[in-house]
Amino acid sequence: MLTIALLAAAGCAPAVEGPGVVVEKAWSRPAAAGGVGGGFAIIENRGKGPVTVVLITSPQADRAEFHQSIEAGGIWSMKDFPNGIVIAPHGKLVLAPGGYHVMLVGLKARAEEGQTIPATLTIRRGATTWTTEVSFAVRASPP
């Protein structure tokens, strides 16, 4: 597996490239210890074939899950993606409030503005799987 470190800059995480995949603008809102946080970023597939963002984990949460907020008839619900999310060739997965996002469940410490929340994405293209280290910059609003 290939591991690539994504380091947080002052208030905004810089882009990182994996085998044809770029992760940028990773951020999270402040959240209470024991609570639920959100992870947001843009994941771009610059390769010729589809990729699947298979899994996300974080040492600062009991678990991390991919979800999508969906509104239908004035009622909001969340869909989970236990098998990951496919990104088409030359496509983007935008993780943002009110849409696709990462739920960081059971935060082990308070997430305060200026801190980062580390996480590991597992990505698959065909038979090749690799991990990418992401740091979600904790901030009050998107970068």
Image (cartoon, grey):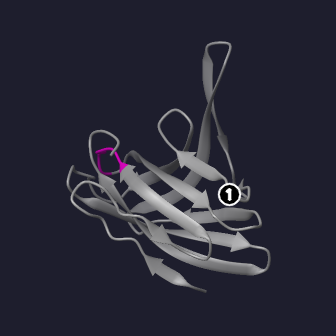
Q: Is residue 112 left or right of residue 53?
A: left
Which of the 4 quarters of the picture holds residue 115?
bottom left
Q: Quadrant of the N terminus?
A: bottom right
Q: Is residue 86 above or below residue 1?
A: above
Which of the 4 quarters of the picture holds residue 75?
top right
**x, y percent for residue 13:** 34, 60
Q: Residues in magenta?
A: 28-33
Which of the 4 quarters of the picture holds residue 51?
bottom right
Q: Kindly identify the residue that appears in the image at 30 percent across and 55 percent down.
A: 12
Q: SS at mark 1? A: loop
Q: Kindly identify the residue that appears in the image at 27 percent across and 40 percent down.
A: 140
Q: Kindly identify the residue that appears in the image at 28 percent across and 45 percent down.
A: 30
Q: Is residue 122 left or right of residue 111?
A: right
Task: Categorize mark 1 by other alpha carbons within 10 Å: few (<14), some (14-19), many (20+).
Answer: some
**x, y percent for residue 35:** 37, 46
User: What amino acid is at disc 1?
Assistant: His
Q: Is residue 117 above or below residue 101?
A: below
Q: Is residue 99 left or right of residue 105?
A: right
Q: Main secondary structure of the magenta part?
A: loop
**x, y percent for residue 34:** 35, 50
**x, y percent for residue 55:** 62, 64
Q: Kindly identify the residue that appears in the image at 55 percent across and 63 percent down.
A: 56
Judge by depth and name the residue closer to the eye, 15 or 34. Answer: 15
Q: Is residue 58 left or right of residue 48?
A: left
Q: Which residue is mark 1?
A: 90
Judge by depth and name the residue closer to the eye, 103 or 22. Answer: 22
